[in-house]
Amino acid sequence: MNKTTELFAPGHRGCAGCCDALAAKFMLKAVGENCIVVTPTGCLEVFSTPFPESAWNVPWIHSLFENTAAVASGIEAALKALGRKNDTKIMAIGGDGATIDIGIRGLSGAFERGHDFTYVCVDNEAYMNTGVQRSGGTPFAATTTTTPAGKASFGNLRPKKNMPQIMLAHGSPYVATTSIAYPKDMMRKVKKATEITGPTYVHVHAPCTTGWGFDGSKTIELGRLAVQTALWPMMEIENGDITGVHKIRNKRPVEEYLKAQKRFKHLFSIPDGAEIIKKIQELADWNADQYDL
Amino acid sequence: MSSKLCIGGIVEPGSTVINKTGSWRTFKPIYHHEKCIKCGICELSCPESCIIKTEDGYYEIDYDYCKGCGICSNECPRETIEMVLEEK
Amino acid sequence: MSKLTVVEGSYAVAHAAKVCRPDVIPAYPITPQTHIVEELSQFAANGEIGACEYITVESEFSAISALIGASAAGARTYSATTSQGLALMHEVLFNASGMRLPLVMTVANRAMSAPLSIWNDHQDSIAQRDTGWIQLYAEDPQEAADMTPQVYKICEDSKIMLPAMACFDGFILTHVYEPVVLLEQDLTDEFLPPFAPEHILDPSNPKTFGAFADPSIYSEFRYMQELGMSAALKKIETVADEFNEIYGRYYGGLIDGYYLDDAEIVLVAMGSVIGTIKDVLDELRAEGKKVGLLKIRSFRPFPTDAIRNAVKNAAIIVPLDKSISIGKYEGALCTEIKASLYNTKIDIPVLGYMFGHGGRDIPPERIKKIVSEAEKAIVNGITIESSYADLREELL
């Protein structure tokens, strides 16, 4: 007999220590049962809804990979037209690939049109469902199965696409960054996002045990390190102004974060590894300086 | 699973509970309640939602679903939860 | 007697969509569909479609995706598209039919690029034949308008629950001004009951839509779609009759015939060319030629039994296609008619022609020439099974 009261039910097929399962749990905990969730194709979708089972205790729909925001906008329009919108929250939960890469057209359109919904990007920085291929969310110098390190490459050559800034440019009244390593921060921001009228965006950093190469017990620890190194700044931006920044008490060197993951392991053995680590440190320092972390 | 398929493949909510993921486990978390400060971090940190608060304010694990990831043990500020190799 | 109004074909269809009381209309403009969605957005702006939400999506891909969300949430939906827009929707078309959402979409048939062409043929919707959508083809603006409430009634049937395309020829029918009866609201309310799906996205009864299926269960869902199509075969006929009872107009159910009963030469066609063919047949019948027309109204579900029954006494069958399967060198009607006759005792030659691609005009003389070729083929047999009837050989 299942004893939990959580809206995201156990029995799902997420890996032991899964970041997406944590993200889904926190989001539903924050928003409650009066919501409708849209999820694109991806790990979260596959491990939570193998027919005839579903981990979702709220109404939930998966259509395709790249149309999540458009599906959400149709739901919102329907609830309005049918007089059923009331306090029902519409929440789209997409991975980095679905959000940053293949789904960005529909997401941009839905935000520009101003639908009343919240889009949450759970960013584990690669296409994990298909076997850890590079996405626009993959960080600089990380190896993935399509950006392997080799004699002619140190891994992913480009930095992460700055998705929160893109969503901010749409005039969204609320854009926030958070991490599954800070459940209370994440739940507060997701709840706030759903309570603000209009298209709101929350970008959640989510370390993937399988894709990044670390022990499943360290999922939250890795997320914390990303924040403590300033590689993942957590903030809130309301009506275009930064209104809250998560301050770092003891800033840690990026090596601590990089060393803990297989995807950055090569940086500690290749000839120009130290130089690349220095560049990553510069990215972190820029964040710390830019956002006064 | 009903004997007849629902048109369009509609599924009932929360129905993954029939899938007892506890069988995946290699290491089993064991509580040492004498160290527990009842902070609830373990419960919050569980990706399976299988850590349950008991009436006396401590926490227990629903081993039907616990995959043994060890996040609870890793996150516990008082080393209350020990991961033990499970003999099956 | 219903009042005739001279309006553009697009207006007639937009007006028909309006009286079906859609809740959500996501649409993206594309020639030659634009006038339909412009008229609808004006109706919505005037408050003439109740609380209907008109969504100005950023692509056809999002148009159909928003339809999926809206329909799953319990809304009656409408959209219109064509050609490149329909092709952009391709992936989502499968998704909508697999999720058994009864979306209704008007397709203003247009050729596919490259070369770029904004003019009419049937390549766009024919290319979507296997996506699990019902496809009906109208021959004139009145039929296109009347088809709109009919497809809602067909696809929202609980035994069917499949999306539908109401197809009518771009420019030829979308932009023509003709006297039509604009559908009356009271009659449409009598004809078409409100949309009341069994399952919707609703927090008070939370269901999961769009789970994934492993190999042990996938084929059964496909087969259930086929059962829906089988149910549609019957429903298309009964809905056409019900429409006739309430509005007094009838265009056939799955198929229709013109001089078909004693025809030796049976032309088979869909869409606006039907009108031209009917005029030609009036002339040829006056000359004593036994030529008839089989109008295909439902391309999906394909009315195999009805076709067998309709052509069984012919001497030759002549499918006329505004589409081509490149690499097979024949159009979709030709292929499917031939397939329908195989494994039966019907042994009638099939002589296929393709014409009117990319908007090329189909004058009556071309139909007459095809008929005379068919007459020769009855005597001499078929040498070429399928060919273009209007190829400009001098350019090749």
Image (cartoon, coloured by chain):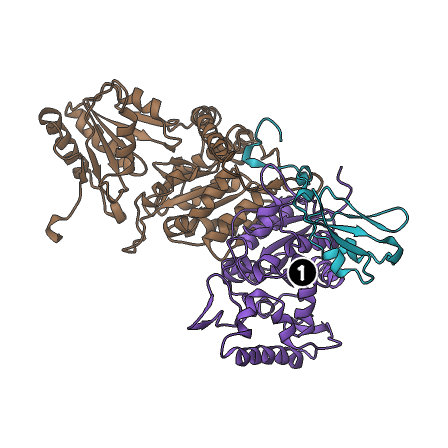
Chain colours: A purple, B cyan, C brown
Quadrant in the picture for the N terminus of chain B: top right
Amino acid type of disc 1?
Answer: Thr
Query: Which quadrant of the figure has residue C270?
Result: top left
* Image height of A164 relative to A119, above or below: below
- In the picture, measured across the screen, residue A172 lies left or right of residue A103, that is right
As drawn, the residue found furthest toward the front would be: B87
Question: Which of the 4 image quarters holds residue C124?
Answer: top left
Q: Return the residue found at the far left.
A: C380
In the depicted view, which residue is nearer to us: A145 or A134? Answer: A145
Q: Residue at x 57, y 51 (%)?
A: A43
Depth check, front residue: A136 or B85: B85
- Regarding residue C45, the answer to whether it shows in the image is no
Disc 1 sits on a residue from what chain?
A
Extreme right residue here? B56
Decide: is B33 above or below A269. Answer: above
Query: In the image, residue B67 lies at what x, y percent?
Result: 68, 48
Local secondary structure at mark 1: helix
